[in-house]
């Protein structure tokens, strides 16, 4: 069979997915979950190309539009409201590839967060690929700005050269820096207004980074983390995963593989970045044990 479209339902809504069958008798598949305001093709056709890469290696793939996105009906939902979409997509994928034994979820940004909230509840999930996971809080974003932009700028020669030549007002930049420092010195757990009240089933309603850490702990399978070198979302995740008490030791666990792609942006827009991500993902998939065969 060639890749083909499938329509499935979540409640009263119709969702569209694309199946890439892979090899006959394949026992593992990859479910690509879409993050942010995207649809199943992905930025720069990333998800389409990634799916075809896996399928060419014999690995079945299913990519789909969440409710309210792309060609799926209903109201748009964020990453904390797609549990039913993921569960039904898993059911549909399993029905389309009957011999499939387990599934790895591949998610970028908010989809990586959604995967952490979901994976521990579904015994079919054998592993997770989390690309630039979303852990956004006001305080975390401020710290990421400080580390990746402001400090570099303050120590850059062109900044002071431009200030001395009157090209811009350095005091405006310093005032902005002061505001960022103030935000970064907020609660280290990092709940921002509007987030502390959002609850994920059975994980609670604490700050987003803490709830993601809890999902990480509850999922016992292997995890591949891919971080871009030039991305604020990735920078914020690095800071949270290495300094927040809730994340203590999680990124250093033996079941975790970390890959960092220097120079890459959030969506891996260049071909060499996209190809590197695909290669890392495929190589890691070959080492993930089948469910029940650990």
Image (tube, grey):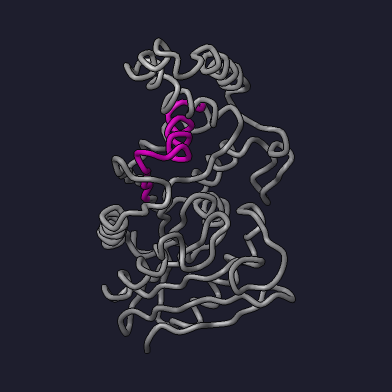
**Foreground of the two, 65 or 101:** 65
| 191 relative to 275, above or below | above
Region rendered in magenta: 224-244
User: Is residue 242 covered in magenta?
Assistant: yes
| 45 relative to 8, above or below | above
To which quarter of the image does residue 290 belong? bottom left
Q: Quadrant of the N terminus?
A: bottom left
To which quarter of the image does residue 102 belong? bottom left
Q: Is residue 200 left or right of residue 248?
A: right
Residue 47 place in picture, x, y as percent: 42, 65
Residue 20 place in picture, x, y as percent: 40, 78
Q: Is residue 240 left or right of residue 191?
A: left
To which quarter of the image does residue 253 belong? top left
**Foreground of the two, 154 or 187:** 154
Is residue 44 visible in the rendered structure shown here?
A: yes
Residue 21 place in picture, x, y as percent: 38, 81
**Foreground of the two, 214 or 154:** 154
């Amino acid at each position: 069979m060639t890749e083909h479209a499938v329509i499935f339902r979540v409640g009263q809504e119709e969702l569209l997915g694309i199946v890439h069958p892979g090899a006959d008798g394949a026992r593992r598949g990859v479910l690509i979950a879409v993050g942010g305001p995207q649809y199943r093709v992905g930025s720069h056709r990333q998800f389409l190309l990634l799916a075809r890469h896996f399928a060419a290696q014999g690995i079945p793939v299913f990519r789909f539009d969440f409710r309210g996105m792309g060609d799926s009906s209903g109201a748009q939902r964020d990453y904390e409201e797609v549990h039913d979409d993921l569960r039904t997509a898993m059911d549909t994928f399993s029905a389309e590839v009957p011999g499939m034994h387990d599934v790895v979820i591949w998610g970028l940004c908010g989809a990586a967060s959604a995967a952490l909230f979901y994976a521990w509840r579904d015994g079919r999930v054998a592993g997770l690929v989390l690309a630039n996971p979303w852990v956004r809080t006001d305080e975390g974003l401020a710290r990421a700005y400080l580390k990746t932009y402001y400090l570099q700028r303050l120590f850059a020669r062109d900044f002071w050269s431009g200030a001395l030549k009157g090209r811009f007002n350095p005091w405006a930049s310093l005032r902005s820096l002061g505001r960022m420092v103030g935000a970064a010195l907020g609660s280290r757990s990092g709940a921002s207004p509007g987030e502390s009240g959002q609850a994920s089933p059975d994980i609670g309603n604490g700050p987003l980074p803490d709830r993601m850490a809890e999902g990480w702990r509850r999922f016992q399978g292997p995890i591949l983390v891919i971080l871009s070198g030039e991305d604020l979302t990735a920078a914020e995740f690095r800071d949270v995963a290495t300094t927040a008490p809730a994340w203590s030791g999680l990124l250093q666990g033996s079941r975790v593989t970390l890959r960092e792609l220097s120079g890459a942006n959030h969506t891996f827009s260049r071909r060499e970045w996209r190809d590197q991500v695909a290669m890392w993902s495929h190589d890691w998939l070959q080492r993930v044990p089948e469910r029940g065969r650990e």
